Image (cartoon, helix red, strand yellow):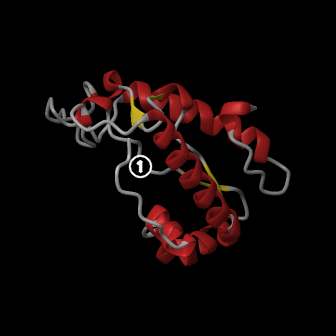
Amino acid sequence: MIDDITSVDETLFRRMLLGSLLETRPAIRALAKNFGKPVFALPRPFMARRRDEGRVVPPALGAFLREEWEAALAAELNEAGALLLPQPADSIVDELYSRDDLSRGSKRVRGESHEDDDCSHLNAEYGAMVIRDAERMAGIARGSELDNRDPRYV
């Protein structure tokens, strides 16, 4: 239950949701123009569920925040000539967290394991899910105008 609700201007809310994307839009636009093919943007995955065990975002609020964030991000990316590749649906729990098992056994680029309590880096199973969705989305986008349909519902 939210005891104290504060009203936030929609423009400010979008800036909070999108963060640094607004500054990187020119770079995304240049990539899309120079490659002449669809460019996919994959945001950082949600934290693993165990990280916030003591302060859980209620699922209804988590669903609202995720939907608003993904819609705003997709619109900004489309404007820049890119497509949003959202976090795979089967990697998400409680609307706003990554599955805990996907953070176990994650590796650094050089092959060393992340610490056991690391909840922000996900493992190879998550990577396979992302590749699966990227391949699916590439099939949708290939030979057509940019199509930001969510690959989870295709």
Q: Secondary structure at mark 1?
A: loop
In the rendered view, does 8 fall on the left or right side of 80?
left
In the rendered view, does 140 fall on the left or right side of 49?
right
Counting from the top left corner in percent of width and height, residue 40 is at 60, 53
Outermost right residue:
144
In the rendered image of this protein, does residue 95 appear above or below residue 38?
above
Q: Amino acid at mark 1?
A: Arg
Counting from the top left corner in percent of width and height, residue 48 is at 32, 33
Counting from the top left corner in percent of width and height, residue 61 is at 47, 43
Residue bearing mark 1: 44
Badge 1 crowding class, 10 Å Cα cut-off, few under 14, some 14 to 19, many 20 or more, is few
In the rendered view, does 49 fall on the left or right side of 83?
left
Residue in view at x 38 percent, y 47 percent: 2
Residue in view at x 61 percent, y 75 percent: 30
Residue in view at x 63 percent, y 63 percent: 77
In the rendered image of this protein, does residue 142 appear above or below residue 82?
above
Front-lying residue, 95 or 108: 95
In the rendered image of this protein, does residue 26 appear above or below residue 46?
below
Q: How many marks?
A: 1
Residue in view at x 69 percent, y 34 percent: 136
In the rendered image of this protein, does residue 151 appear above or below residue 8?
above
Image quadrant holding the C terminus, namely top right
Outermost front residue:
3
Which quadrant of the structure image shows residue 36? Answer: bottom right
Counting from the top left corner in percent of width and height, residue 11 is at 55, 74
Image quadrant holding the N terminus, namely top left
Front-lying residue, 138 or 121: 121
